[in-house]
Image (cartoon, rainbow, N blue to C red):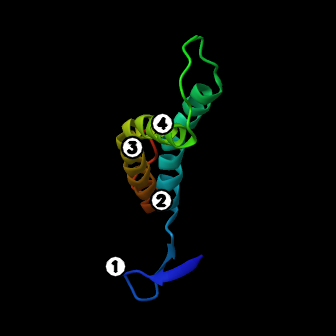
Amino acid sequence: MQKDASSQGSSNETREWPSPEAVAAAVNAIVVVCLPVILIITMWLTPTTSVTVHADPASATAFVKLAETLFVFVPFTPFAAVAAWRTWTHARRYLDGNGAGWRE
């Protein structure tokens, strides 16, 4: 980890980069965004019960799979952003000694 001089406080004070609260927020956002992976894998691996036969060119299949992925990931993006912000805020307050987690 790199140490950067903080713009706030004394010149002897150093802050870690990346900061622990930023790492926690990023991990939390990644977890929330990656939850749909289970849904996508389930959709791709579950056989359909349809008896209709369709042409299945490789390019169309790739486009459809990309569209399915976006349709699942995009709605989770705002939730991931809120989870990351909330985690960063609580972690920052906890590390500054101003908060005790959920109980205040």
x and y, in percent, of residue 60 in the image: 49, 39
**Label 4 vs 2, first from the N-terminus:** 2
**Crowding near the residue tagged with mark 3, few <14, some 14–19, many ≥20 C-alpha atoms within 10 Å:** some
Identity of the residue drawn at 58% across and 10% down: 51
**Among numbered discs 1 and 4, the one appearing first in the sequence:** 1
First along the sequence among labels 2 and 3: 2
Give the quadrant of the C terminus.
Answer: top left
| Residue wearing tag 2 | 21
In the rendering, which numbered label is found on residue 63?
Answer: none
Compared to residue 9, the image places residue 49 above or below, namely above
Identify which amino acid the numbered label 1 is placed on: Gln
Question: Between tags 2 and 1, which lies in front?
Answer: 2
Question: Please, what is the three-letter code of the amino acid marked with disc 4?
Answer: Val
Disc 2 and disc 1: Cα gap in Å? 17 Å
Q: Which mark is residue 8?
A: 1
Q: Which residue is mark 3?
A: 77
Q: Nearer the viewer, residue 1 or 104?
A: 1
Frontmost residue, 15 versus 39: 39
